[in-house]
Amino acid sequence: MAYSAKLRVWRGDATSGELQDFEVEAEEGEVVLDLIHRLQATQTPDLAVRWNCKAGKCGSCSAEVNGRPRLLCMTRMSIFGEDEVITVTPMRAFPVIRDLVPDVSYNYEKAREIPSFTPPEGLEPGEYRMQQVDVERSQEFRKCIECFLCQDTCHVIRDHEENKESFAGPRFLMRVAELEMHPLDVADRVGDAQDVHGLGYCNITKCCTEVCPEGIRITDNALIPMKERVADRRYDPIVWLGNKIFKRNGA
Amino acid sequence: MAFDVASPAGTPSSDTPTPARASIAARTLRTDRWWLPPLLTSVGLATFVIYATVRSFLRTDYWDAENHYLTPFYSPCLSESCVAGSSHFGTPIGELPGFVPLAFLSLPFLLGFRLTCYYYRKAYYRSIWMAPPACGVGEPHERYTGETRLPLILQNVHRYFFYAAFVITIINTYDAILAFGGENGFGIGLGNLVLLLNVVLLWCYTLSCHSCRHVTGGRLKHFSRNPVRYWTWTQVSRLNTRHMQFAWLTLGTLVLTDLYVWLVSSGVIADLRFIN
């Protein structure tokens, strides 16, 4: 049954902005993005919002709804009361371009800092052979749609802009983990995870896992295993000694 | 609404020029009771810490001589200060002054194991240090360096506490097995079931540890070359998904076990016997 939903939307740009109140008709079964589109169509034709697939797979419509990082297209109106004011703001960890559209280029810069997949020398594309059991662990991380909600919610950069330089954020530490766990990747990623990508900043409070729309267990399956690998390398003399004695370089 | 270019938490966190984020002064726009989980966590942790501290120094009613129940807070009891029968591994250590807990060889390692545990870190970073108190809620600290420097870089020694906790859990298991042989020989009472439940959950908590998961197989790059370790890693991973639940359950069963032994050994209640 249709009702008049109360929306409070942040409108503005890099120089100024404010939360503005609107009443928008809501139909049964709709999501927040539907209301944003209706708002755009009926009251604010210049409202900027980034979206694409409307199916939770492109990662474009990331924003914050009632202060929680979410995909607008996957946030059902039915989870809110009809009298509830629904506040929609852009992701707060990134600079804003206009209205609900942030500048997420920080993420692309961090992505470029990670060396790409590095196969063993002499192994050409087409010659890669690996067991399913060896690749399936890192395949979980390939589900990432790069919505950057995990980056947005991570307090290391959300609350401390100055950490952006030295901290890659959960999405890209997960990318490092994905490559580190890849059976054919031979690049040394453990040292870089700590020194270049700032793994030590992570205090495993799991907000990244909480907001991930793909349900990737970022903290348990990527960040903590990477922290343990760093501990192997940096803080565990027994592992270090074992590696020396048995001349092993990973297993 | 008045606005200015501010950090999302409402207070600029350093002198670093703040990029032009959306100017929203509120610390959070969350409308749910985000403060409740950290509050409950703080209360739960504080309750356990107070109880465990008091009991560890109390030195009374930790051994039920009739049923051979020994509370885990006094295991292993290796000092001549321990009451007769409670020292399952002899008394190689002399009398201890009153300010030293009788289980001084295990308690620091158990404390270290829980303090550096990946779950408890999340719990107290959120609830006590408020970094952050909840997702999407600004933290109150001006600077943040995480676990990159002392003292928090020491969290990386978690695996050593895991090794120690593994040994101590074996000792707790031994205590629980010995408790089936009381003064009158073999018997089973409610206390045995309490001790048994406690050690089963302690094993679940210890084996579900992230360091255990790493040591058993997580550090491997090729599972296919190590099928036994892969199988072990798979089992530990299944437990690991419930690490938080085991963390809280074991706090509860430790208190329950100690309280039961306390009440039985002090004569406040009688042990409910099923066999002998």
Image (tube, coloured by chain):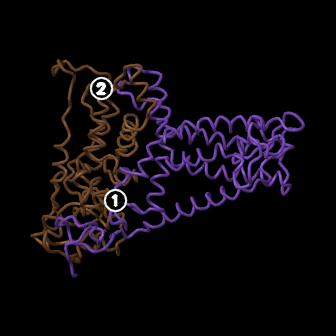
Chain colours: A brown, B purple
Label for residue B160?
A: none
Quarter of the image where the C terminus of chain A is located: top left
Q: Is residue B57 left or right of residue A83?
A: right
The secondary element bearing badge 1 is classed as loop
Q: Residues within 10 Å of mark 1 (few under 14, many from 20)?
A: some
State the residue in front, B139 or B205: B139
Q: Measuring 18% from the left and 51% from the top, which residue is drawn there?
A: A53
Disc 1 from disc 2: Cα separation = 35 Å
Q: At label 2, which amino acid type do we have? A: Pro
Residue B2: image x %, image y %? 21, 81
- Give me the disc on residue A183: 2
Residue found farthest to the bottom: B1
Residue A71 in percent (x, y) is at 26, 57
Q: Is B196 positioned to the left or the right of A189 in the image?
A: right
Disc sitting over residue B144 in the figure:
1
Using the image, determine if residue B149 lies above or below residue B23. above
Q: Residues within 10 Å of mark 2 (few under 14, many from 20)?
A: many
From the viewer's side, name the closer residue of B116 and A127: B116
Q: Position of residue B16 (x, y in %)?
A: 21, 64
Using residue A198 as the reference point, say whether residue A36 is left or right of it: left
Which residue occupies the foreground of this view, A230 or B81? B81
The mark lying in front, picked from 1 and 2, is 1
Where is the N terminus of chain A found, in terms of image quarters?
A: bottom left
Question: The residue marked by circle 1 belongs to what chain?
Answer: B
Q: What percent of the width, then of the height, locates residue A198?
A: 29, 47
Residue pictured at 43% horizontal, 43% vertical: B156
Give the image quarter of residue A103.
bottom left
